[in-house]
Image (cartoon, helix red, strand yellow):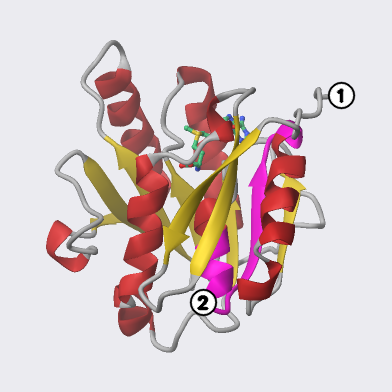
Amino acid sequence: MAASMDLSKLFVREYEKNDGTVLKFYQSEIGDVGCVVWDAALVLSKYLETGDLCKRSGGTMQGKTVVELGAGTGAVGLVAASMGADVTVTDLAEFVPLMEHNIKENATSLTGKMHATTLTWGASISDGVPSAPDLVLLADCIYYEESLEPLVKTIHSLCCPTTRVLCCYEKRDTGNKPELERKFFELVEAVLNKQEIPHQRQDPHFSSDDIYIFEFRLKDITT
Ligand SMILES: C[S@@+](CC[C@H](N)C(=O)[O-])C[C@H]1O[C@@H](n2cnc3c(N)ncnc32)[C@H](O)[C@@H]1O
């Protein structure tokens, strides 16, 4: 069983939404990489707020079923739930208490339902995770070799023909990172179509030359 995280040493990062609402992302001083909010999570959150995705897919975030993978603090999921989506944030078991803490602390700003549960990439997907969600979100989840196949397997198994996957990541040039990125996209493109969200469609203030957003859909879906 995974060690549970020490929630006694938390520090907060405030996230101001475009409508002025402030969300609080609690991060932990102690723990693995998911304890803090990464820049890709902020870029993806601000992209959701642009409304670009909803313009293209019809409707709003209201009532959309969303699953976030490798959510860490649950930051992107919190923004989606504050826009009315019904969100399941997932990560390794040790992160569930931190995600639950963030859900509780932001409860008054969330208009959609939100809960946290364990989802280990490649493992069978538990009943607590909706099948065939409208949207799957990933921020900064391409970073180690052994996880690539399981991660792509999980993304693919969540997808139905109407599911859109938004994958945001920071391009890194050091060590084996370019090779990891190449391999991830090779695996993705075997089962999913990939389309880049150009920087002009992202939030003008929260975008960066080295942070990319891609949208994946099951192959042969054209709308
Ligand atoms: C770099 S962090 C990104 C966290 C968050 N998405 C963000 O951008 O702030 C990568 C996340 O992937 C999670 N992760 C890594 N391997 C995983 C696996 N095999 N199954 C599920 N989650 C995993 C980590 O626990 C961590 O929370």
Residue appearing at x 36%, y 44% in the figure: 40
Ligand 1 positioned in quadrant: top right
Badge 2 crowding class, 10 Å Cα cut-off, few under 14, some 14 to 19, many 20 or more, is many
Q: Give how far across and how far down residue 159 sits, in percent.
A: 54, 60
Q: Which of 165 and 30 is in front in this view?
A: 30
Image height of 72 relative to 198, above or below: above
* Residue 30 placement, left or right of 206: right
Badge 1 crowding class, 10 Å Cα cut-off, few under 14, some 14 to 19, many 20 or more, is few
Image height of 209 relative to 45, above or below: above
Task: Please tell me the numbered disc located at residue 83.
Answer: 2
Which one is closest to the eye, mark 2 or mark 1? 2
SS type, badge 1: loop
Residue appearing at x 29%, y 52% in the figure: 213
Q: Quadrant of the N terminus?
A: top right
Q: What residue type is labelled 1?
A: Met
* Residue 155 placement, left or right of 44: right
Q: Nearer the viewer, residue 49 or 128?
A: 49
- CA gap between label 2 and label 1 equals 34 Å
